[in-house]
Image: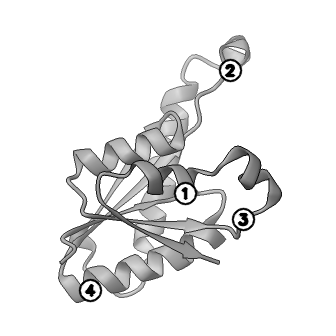
């Protein structure tokens, strides 16, 4: 069934991620599939570059990788050898879709808020992932 499951993780909104992770863990346990977690860092606008130290990107990358390792360490009972992580930088939906193709995922499990007026007008990352994913997508609502 599902051999490779991708879960986008927003380190700032773990309340949205937690239900999606729970579903992904349950599915991977049923199918014996691997679990791949991805966090996408935002690109810092060029206008701010003169205000940050030269090592800013490397420090942010290392900090995010550390936080992702903590997420994996705190996962409930699961074979941790089947869990991998990635920290990418760019637009969330582009990077998630790219990671799904790179990892040959056959399912993306994404957490989502209930729609609000702003998401009806602007769209959401979850909606864009659903529309353009190269595989099946499970959207887990809070």
Which of the labelled discs sits on residue 52, or is there none?
A: 2
- Residue 88 image position (x, y, % from top left): 43, 40
Above or below: residue 30 compared with residue 100: below
Task: Name the one closer to the observer, 59 or 109.
Answer: 109
Q: CA distance from mark 1 to mark 4?
A: 24 Å
Q: Image check: 31 left or right of 108?
A: left
Q: CA distance from mark 3 to mark 2?
A: 35 Å
Mark positioned earlier in the residue sequence (4 or 2): 4
Tell me the residue that label 3 is attached to.
115
Give me the residue at 66% from left, 57% from top.
12
Above or below residue 113? Residue 89 is above
x and y percentages locating residue 86 in the rendered image: 36, 49
Q: Quarter of the image containing the N terminus?
A: bottom left
Q: CA distance from mark 2 to mark 1?
A: 31 Å
Q: How is the image coloured?
A: one colour
Q: Residue at x 54, y 23 (%)?
A: 55
Q: Which residue is mark 4?
A: 29
**Could you give the CA–CA distance between mark 4 and mark 2, rounded to whole angstroms?**
43 Å
The residue mark sitting in front, 4 or 3, is 3
Which circle's residue, 1 or 4, is located before the other in the chain? 4
Q: Quadrant of residue 44?
A: top right
Q: Nearer the viewer, mark 2 or mark 1?
A: 1
**In this view, the mark in front (4 or 2):** 4
Residue 72 at least partly seen: yes
């Amino acid at each position: 069934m599902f051999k490779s499951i991708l879960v986008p993780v927003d380190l700032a909104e773990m309340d949205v991620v937690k239900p999606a992770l729970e579903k992904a863990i349950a599915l991977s346990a049923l199918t014996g599939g691997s679990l791949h977690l991805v966090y996408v860092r935002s690109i810092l606008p060029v206008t701010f570059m003169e205000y940050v130290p030269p090592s800013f990107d490397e420090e942010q990358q290392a900090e995010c990788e550390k936080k992702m390792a903590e997420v994996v360490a705190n996962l409930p009972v699961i074979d941790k050898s089947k869990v991998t992580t990635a920290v990418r930088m760019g637009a969330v939906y582009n990077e998630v879709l790219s990671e799904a193709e790179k990892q040959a995922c056959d399912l993306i499990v994404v957490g989502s808020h209930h729609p609000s007026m702003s998401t009806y007008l602007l769209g959401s990352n979850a909606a864009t992932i659903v529309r353009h994913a190269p595989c099946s997508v499970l959207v887990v609502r809070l």
